[in-house]
Amino acid sequence: LTFLGIESSCDDTAAAVVRHVPGQPAEILASIVEGQTALHAAFGGVVPEIAARAHAERLDHCVEAALAGANLRLSDLDGIAVTAGPGLIGGVLSGVMLAKGLSAASGLPMVGVNHLAGHALTPRLTDAVSFPYLLLLVSGGHCQFLIAGNVDDFERLGGTIDDAPGEAFDKTAKLLGLPQPGGPAVQAEAAQGDARRFAFPRPLLDRPGCDMSFSGLKTALLRARDAVIAEKGGITVQDRRDLCAGFQAAVADVLAEKSRRALERYLALNPPTPLLAVAGGVAANTLIRSRLTALCDRMGVRFLAPPLALCTDNAAMIAWAGIERFRLGARDDATLAARPRWPLDQTAAPMIGSGK
Ligand code: ATP
Ligand code: FE
């Protein structure tokens, strides 16, 4: 099967072509991602109206570029997969309307995909892993543990009750005058800092379960920064490094301990080939990665981190999720709805006519 994937739920406009022949590794024939970072930079965050307009303007081009990159025409494909939510509604609508138009014009079947399912099924695209596996999705907008039991069966074990870690990294960078995106900048500073100098909390570790909280860390960072400024009149390069190191260590501690608990619950299912996979931009963090790797080693679980370009938002994961759902009989029609909210575990995506 060869599918076109379309993704426009946040601030990346993306199209991709993925081919899969059963028994062989999936092939990403083309994957185009056009970020909008520069468009939103002046506003200190993603502006929904600007995002929607940029998606509407650039989606056609991305689809053409993906088809050209794959050296295929629409008529060579077997189907079209599109992110139908969750996300910024204007962007999701742009993608869904384009997919409906392409499907109507070409007669190709269309499959609506949950963006989070795209992330969650990525380990099967890159490494053909089998169910059930545990996924930690940790990005700028999301943070949750999911047991992937099947293509349409995800159990959410817990997640953040406020900010996502990527957001906390970005805000930390902002408070310390570092560039965006904050994650890489904070990581670079932390590499030369002393994580023990400032005491950061480890939110919710005293409570059972897999829920997490990261907004308190941002407040702790603000307090620590202001205490240094009050004492010395400003912060030095070393103060900044130590603040970054302390903050990063707190995030890593929380993610490692909550991952341990999620793994315990997952291992109770007696999976034949236990596996923890990560997705999302924060999975690029070297400290967090090494903590998770060590944890998995200790617990006898394989650790899988797909290439970063497939961990962050992209359309190859949407094309892939479309292929997987199509094989289970999923087809959508002109009633396919764009959904701003769409939790993965509540209703597995309805198989037919997701708009109803
Ligand atoms: P979502 O996909 O949930 O809608 P998003 O598009 O913002 O959100 P991603 O593109 O997956 O998320 O990841 C971007 C986030 O990852 C940013 O918040 C960025 O700061 C963070 N990030 C990137 N590299 C690192 C790193 N080395 N350490 C920590 N965080 C990082
Ligand atoms: Fe995403």
Image (cartoon, grey):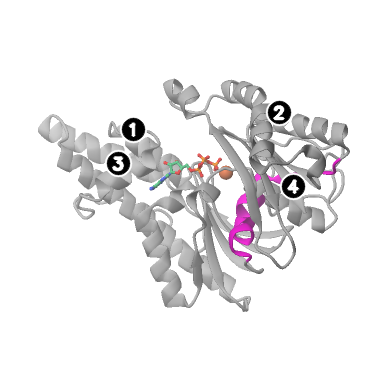
Q: Position of residue 36 (x, y in %)?
A: 52, 28
Give the alpha-carbon distance from disc 3 to disc 4, as whole Å.
45 Å
Rendered residue at 53%/66% (across/down): 276
Is residue 205 in sight in this rendering?
no
Residue 111 in the image: above or below residue 252: above
N-term-proximal mark, 4 vs 2: 4
Q: Nearer the viewer, mark 2 or mark 3?
A: 2
Which residue, given by chain and number where applicable, does mark 4 sit on? 3
Q: Look at label 1 and name its amino acid.
A: Pro
N-term-proximal mark, 1 vs 4: 4
Circles 1 and 4 in contact, beta carbons < 8 Å: no
Label 4 residue SS:
strand
Which residue, given by chain and number where applicable, does mark 1 sit on? 179
N-term-proximal mark, 2 vs 1: 2
Give the alpha-carbon distance from disc 4 to disc 2, as whole Å.
19 Å
Residue 328 in the image: above or below residue 98: below
Give the alpha-carbon distance from disc 2 to disc 3, as whole Å.
38 Å
For residue 110: magenta?
yes
Q: Please identify the quadrant where the N terminus is shown.
A: bottom right
The residues colored magenta run 108-128
- The reply, left or right, for residue 294 in relation to residue 36 is left
Majority secondary structure of magenta residues: helix
Q: Nearer the viewer, residue 315 or 45?
A: 315
Give the alpha-carbon distance from disc 2 to disc 1, as whole Å.
30 Å
Which residue, given by chain and number where applicable, does mark 2 sit on? 94
Residue 243, quarter of the rendered image: top left
Q: Position of residue 168 (x, y in %)?
A: 41, 42
Residue 9, quarter of the rendered image: top right
N-term-proximal mark, 3 vs 4: 4
Rendered residue at 64%/61% (across/down): 124
Which residue, given by chain and number where applicable, does mark 3 sit on? 221
Q: Is mark 3 within 8 Å of ligand 1?
A: no
